[in-house]
Amino acid sequence: MQLPFPEIETPSDEDIEAGRLLFAGETTFLKGVVAMDGLPPADRLEVCFAGRSNVGKSSLINALTGRKGLARASNTPGRTQEINFFTAGDLYVVDLPGYGFANAPVAVVAKWQALLKNYLQGRPTLRRVFVLIDARHGAKAVDEEIMTLLDRAAVTFQVVMTKTDKVKGDALDASLAATRAALVKHPAAYPELILTSSDKGDGIASLRAVIATLEP
């Protein structure tokens, strides 16, 4: 029986090479945005990464781009409240603030949620959001909140499982099952999972290939 939301098949050699070339050049930090009027021009294809605090988002972006210090992880969950734009050739790579920060002030959370909603609904060149889920835990209620927001914004999102090297066997299967059960409720979800480990490099070539083959 075919599982819903199976793991992505290994991309072709051609697509893997396209992904390698996309990120072979220099990736640079463009700007951090705290309001809609600060967004750069929507003049190129754009992908963004979303995930709860401590999911390993900065590490994944660094592995994807081959730049160890590009995206900086904060020791304080929820501390960074900017939408960070990076350029990789003719592509914008966008790092959304970590969500699920229980210790942040209510006003900060409200401001972040409003900015995120406006960004997702008003960015015509945004082709896909990659929602990061910690493979040790599977999808949680806080992850479903962002998925619901993406459904409402009609933005396709694809789940990337992080830290897959930290969990094996039955525990990984249970995590994937929980994630698949969550995804079936979300019409904007792309029907394949990408399993990654930033430390080991697993799945990074596949993620690059997926980005490189998105339709403009």
Image (spheres, grey):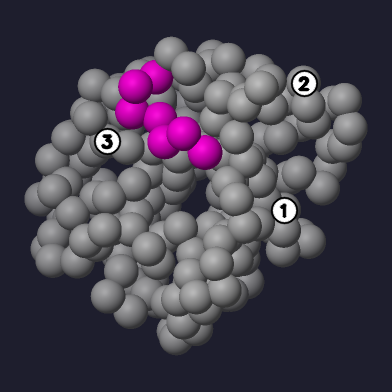
User: Which quadrant, please, contains the N terminus?
Assistant: top right
**Image location (x, y in percent) of residue 214:** 33, 58
Please name the amino acid that badge 2 sits on: Ala
Badge 2 density bin: few <14, some 14–19, many ≥20, Cα 10 Å: some
Magenta stretch?
A: 186-192
- Label 1 secondary element: loop
- Label 2 secondary element: helix
Q: In the rendered view, tell whether residue 135 sits above or below residue 147.
A: below
Q: Nearer the viewer, mark 1 or mark 2?
A: 2
Q: CA distance from mark 2 to mark 3?
A: 27 Å
**Image location (x, y in percent) of residue 51:** 51, 37
Mark 3 and mark 1 residues within 8 Å of each other at the beta carbon: no
Secondary structure predominantly adopted by residues drawn in magenta:
loop
Q: CA distance from mark 1 to mark 2?
A: 18 Å
Please name the amino acid that badge 1 sits on: Ser
Which dot marks residue 174?
A: 2
Which dot marks residue 74?
A: none
* Residue 200 seen in this snapshot: yes
Please name the amino acid that badge 3 sits on: Val
User: Which quadrant, please, contains the C terminus?
Assistant: bottom left
Residue at 38%, 43% (x, y): give it. Answer: 129
Q: CA distance from mark 3 to mark 1?
A: 25 Å
- Label 3 secondary element: loop
Q: Which residue is mark 1?
A: 197
Q: Which residue is mark 3?
A: 155
Badge 3 density bin: few <14, some 14–19, many ≥20, Cα 10 Å: many
Q: Residue furthest bottom?
A: 25
Of label 1 and label 2, which has the lower sequence position? Answer: 2
